[in-house]
Image (spheres, rainbow, N blue to C red):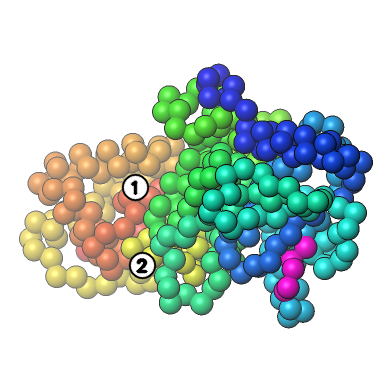
Amino acid sequence: MNNDNKLPHWADILATSVFGYLRQKNLTHLSLIGLWIDDNKNPSVIRKIVTFELLVKALKKIGMNALNPHICFIGAPESDELHCKNIVTKLSSFISPESTSNYELNDAIIIKFNNDENCQHIIEQNNTILLPDVQVRIKGLDPKNSTLPIHAILDCFETDLIRWLISHQSLRTSITFHFDEEITKLYKLFDENEARYYEQMPNENADLPYENIAYKYSYIHDSLPPSKPFRPDFLKLATLLQMYDLDISSAYAYHIHLLKNDLDKSCFSKRSEKIYNWLRSFAPVTCKFSVNKHPIEISLNEKELSFMKNVFNFIKSYEDEVEFEDLDEIGKRFEMFSKEKGLDFSHAKTVLYRHLISKNEGPTFSSFVKYLDRNKLLMLLRK
């Protein structure tokens, strides 16, 4: 186990400070704790809600088991009420969406975030606890996109990942949601952390503080799954969905043998939905492609034409083995094949991509061999 996992989590430290203040003020008997939010459009509201969730969970761990969490969006016009409830519904299974009404909080512990940059510690005012403000950055989101960043985050990021990302960073550290190709790295980091947690493997890089504790905190309810849920790799599933014209049901059918229980099915559905949203509305052009419907005429020199005829025959002879090989192995085979035929592999891939997706680059060619319908693949490559 990593030494970093012996560190106390920031939520535990924060809860201890809050509990000390409440005990000093004789307020530990209060069962209502409310989050006060006066800006419901800024993406930082997501981090505030999750921080509030983690604080409540940590307070319950140290004895305040009866806490009933509520969120109060202050100053939000009635037209924004649905917007506010949607934020809570999409983000939290811990807080009821009905808790967003502007009701009296006189008998509650009230949590606010202080936007004063000089606020270094918890500040107490009567029943109100002021926390340092939290920062959220957005990268790779097209400024021409009319979707509010807060909705873009909820559309493209799984709630488990959102909580994990917020959980493993201290309040003073800014977090960034990426909508360019970097989004795949965020999902990969989460998946790797989850795998290490269940396999009890150390993190050789140790670049995430107290990562196992942070992972446990990403589950608001106490019961973690008994075994690691199946989560398809983000990049591979994004590639597969585009080969299937964004048809989630076809991607589901491809993975059905890997989905052992309801949790696996739920995780697959959630991830495929997030990837679908990302591809439809937010992904940069460099991350998107569409498989050609029909063969297209492309001007080829003699060496390229010979290569295309050979690759067609190679795939036909190879098709029975593809199912049992991973993408790396398929890629190595085709790299060796292109060299044997006298064509540099990068040049060979460009020729193949032009036939398949009318672009000079795209996902690994082995993805097309592995995922694309074999008859369609051969139809597009036939010369």
Q: Tag 2 or tag 1, which sits nearer the N-term?
A: 2
Q: Nearer the viewer, residue 315 or 182?
A: 182
Secondary structure beneath label 2: helix
- Quarter of image, res 292: bottom left
Question: Magenta region: which residues?
Answer: 72-76
Residue occupying image coordinates x 38% and y 42%: 327
- Please say if 150 is above or below 134: below
- Quarter of image, res 89: bottom right
Give left or right: position of 358 versus 306.
right
Q: Nearer the viewer, residue 318 or 234?
A: 234
Residue occupying image coordinates x 31% and y 51%: 365
Local crowd size for mark 2, using a 10 Å CA cut-off: few (<14), some (14–19), many (≥20): few
Residue occupying image coordinates x 52% and y 21%: 2
* Circle nearer the viewer, 1 or 2: 2
For label 1, the residue is 366
For label 2, the residue is 285
Residue 168 has which mark? none
Residue 74 among magenta residues: yes
**How far is the residue under mark 1 from the one under mark 2?**
21 Å
